[in-house]
Amino acid sequence: MKVLAMVMAGGQGTRLHPLTAERSKPAVPFGSRYRIADFVLSSLVNSEIHGIYLLVQYKSQSLIEHVNKSWGQTQPFPGQFVTVVPPQMREGPEWFQGTSDAVFQNINLIERHAPDMVAVFGADHIYRMDVRQMIDFHHQSSAHVSVAAIPIPLAEASAFGIIDADGAGRIKGFLEKPKTPPPMVSDPSRAYGSMGNYLFDTEVLLTALREAKERGEHDFGHNILPRLIKTHNVYAYNFANNRVPGVADYEEQAYWRDVGTIDAYYDAHRDAMGEQPRFKLFNPQWVVNSSNYQGPSARILSGHIENTALGPGSLIRGASVRNSILRREVIVEKDVEIDDCIIMDHSVIRRGSRLRRVIVDRYNNIAPNTSIGFDPVADKARYHVSEGGVVVLPKGSEVPDPSCYQQ
């Protein structure tokens, strides 16, 4: 089977502000070395899908640079590519108006490659997926379209787009955040949540895109899929059945998180930490690819480090760091206390500072003896604070002086 992937990577991510003030949601850093978009790209490449177009739009420069550096040279198979596609405006002076419009504006790419199937996936989520298993399900079900679905407890399902499917998985309807979600036939305690990942038979997709254009429609979830369930075989693929090699027994086997809010983003980092994380980022049998950083390794001159991921080039001088993630080239000076924090690239935490439940975006220089995360009133007066009480410092502008890295 020849499968072409079209990855939707243009999301504004307004609920992740201020982390998305200068970058799109898929470009937001995750863990000690990744970007959110790396997870879908890695799943596709590991699933032997060799042709991938990444459709970008809002504040895309950061993502474009990352993909060019991290994925531009990833070509172990003939004809493999990961190519960024900004809006081409082939149909007029308009940006992408929605998910289906983004694919329609690049319909020439599908026609050029003439694949048997097109995977239309989002770039906004943290997960691993063997897409080949979804393709097998698609064939076995004689589906024209398959929609990846995650079982969600009924008590939480009202916050998601929900799929109503029969016992065989055939979709009867789509409901957007329903007050009374229809339960799964196989598990009445749960409902199917749409993951925003679709597999289309190519001709079905091309016809649907052209019809949507004629009708002035722009979205898969709101327009194309609800119409196709009346005329075609549209099935829900149960992501809970997906098994990726190398996942440990203690992990959540079908881990998937929509990190669309600051609190969800913060909690997903907690899931990736500890001796037995719910989602272990290092899996030699299913590698998540990211930047090929060529700088020095992390250094700890002295201090107390507990349950912490250190990015390359980081330097710790006599600090206490617990339950935290420090990305690339972070400097932590003496007598600093960092608890339950995410410190992004090229930031400096000066002597005597205390940070608790704080996300520090790139290029920040925290002044000596600064205290953040201990006084909610003071924090809200100076910074963005999430509903869950996580303090977020937006991207700064101070590049650390090279002398900072010298002992």
Image: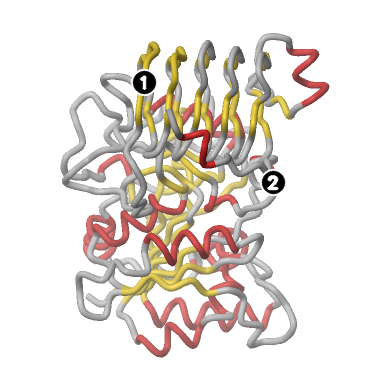
Q: Nearer the viewer, mark 1 or mark 2?
A: 1
Residue 29 in picture, x, y percent from top left: 50, 44
The residue where tag 2 is placed is 14
Question: 259 left or right of 247?
Answer: right
Work out whether 230 lies above or below 38: below
Q: Which quarter of the figure is the C terminus placed in?
A: top left
Marks 1/2 in contact by CB < 8 Å: the verdict is: no
Q: Which residue is mark 1?
A: 301
Viewer-side residue, 114 vs 66: 66
Residue 206's place in the image compared with 397, above or below, is below
Q: At which x and y percent is residue 234?
A: 41, 62
Residue shown at the point (61%, 15%) measured from the top left = 353
Kindly state the secondary structure of the residue where label 1 is placed. Answer: strand
Taking the image as shown, residue 226 lies to the left or right of residue 280, namely right
> Is tag 1's residue or tag 2's residue first in the polypeptide sequence?
2
Determine whether the residue tagged by mark 2 lies in a helix, strand or loop. helix
Q: Is residue 321 above or below residue 125?
A: above
Q: Amino acid at mark 1?
A: Leu
Tell me the CA gap for discs 1 and 2: 39 Å
In this orientation, which residue lies closer to the viewer: 305 or 268? 305
What x and y, as percent, mark residue 255? 35, 36
Q: Colour mode? A: secondary structure
Quarter of the image with the N terminus in it:
bottom left
Q: Residue at x 44, y 14 (%)?
A: 318
Circle 2: residue type = Thr
